[in-house]
Amino acid sequence: MPRLTEAEQKDFLSTPGILMRIACVRADGSPLVTPIWFIYHQDAICFTPRAQSECFDCLKQDSRVALCIDEQNLPYRKVIVEGEAQLQHDLGEDDQWRDLYRQIAKRYVPPEAAEAYVQDTKDQERALYSLPLKNSTVKSWRMPTKGEPGNGIWHQRYYAPGTKFAD
């Protein structure tokens, strides 16, 4: 599959409504995957686990994460990011970054509903984490578009030797 160019990647990560799945590690070493809202902000993926979430507990113990951001419809763009999440604001600091949370909410619901959601959940503390892309492993791809070779649907390593698209 073709990789997203830097411009395509920024455009995709800025597309409203696409959920992110965050994978982190529980204290016992087992994986946890959680769908969560995010925003692409200052060349980083920012997300906000609530104080009571299992994800937040995991991040406090081990900041290693893998993020999967993908879409269900053509051209099936996907971005996978692996790295160490950075705590930008801890619990109790919500007022310092609430405007960014408004921006996150507006990516998923209409502006009036986003403001109501922010106001209705002010008493639910959140932390703000970021994963800067420059310090992370980033993989991206999409389906080939018109004029691109159709055999690029999978990465070359997935084609068994001697099969139709192996070469």
Image (cartoon, rainbow, N blue to C red):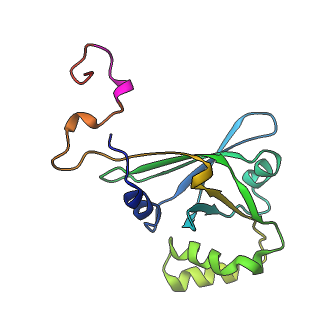
Task: Work out whether 77 lies above or below 152.
Answer: below
Q: Is residue 160 magenta?
A: yes
Task: Work out whether 155 lies above or below 124.
Answer: above
The residue stretch that appears in magenta? 156-161
Q: Position of residue 61 (x, y in %)?
A: 82, 46
Task: Work out whether 39 lies above or below 27.
Answer: below
**Which residue is pictured at 55% across the width and 63% down the height?**
43
Can you tell which quarter of the image residue 114 is in?
bottom right
> Would you say 78 lies left or right of 57 here?
left
**Which residue is pictured at 76% across the width and 55% down the height?**
56
**Which residue is pictured at 79% across the width and 77% down the height?**
123
For this rendering, which residue is in front, 53 or 107?
107
Q: How many marks?
A: 0
The residue furthest bottom is 112
**Which residue is pictured at 80% across the width and 34% down the height?**
28
Q: Is residue 140 magenta?
A: no
Can you tell which quarter of the image residue 127 is in?
bottom right
Q: Position of residue 73 (x, y in %)?
A: 33, 54
The residue furthest left is 147
The residue furthest top is 162
Q: Quadrant of the N terminus?
A: top left
Whether residue 121 is visible, yes or no, is: no
Q: Position of residue 67 (x, y in %)?
A: 58, 49
> Would you say 129 lies left or right of 138 here?
right
For this rendering, which residue is in front, 98 or 119?
98
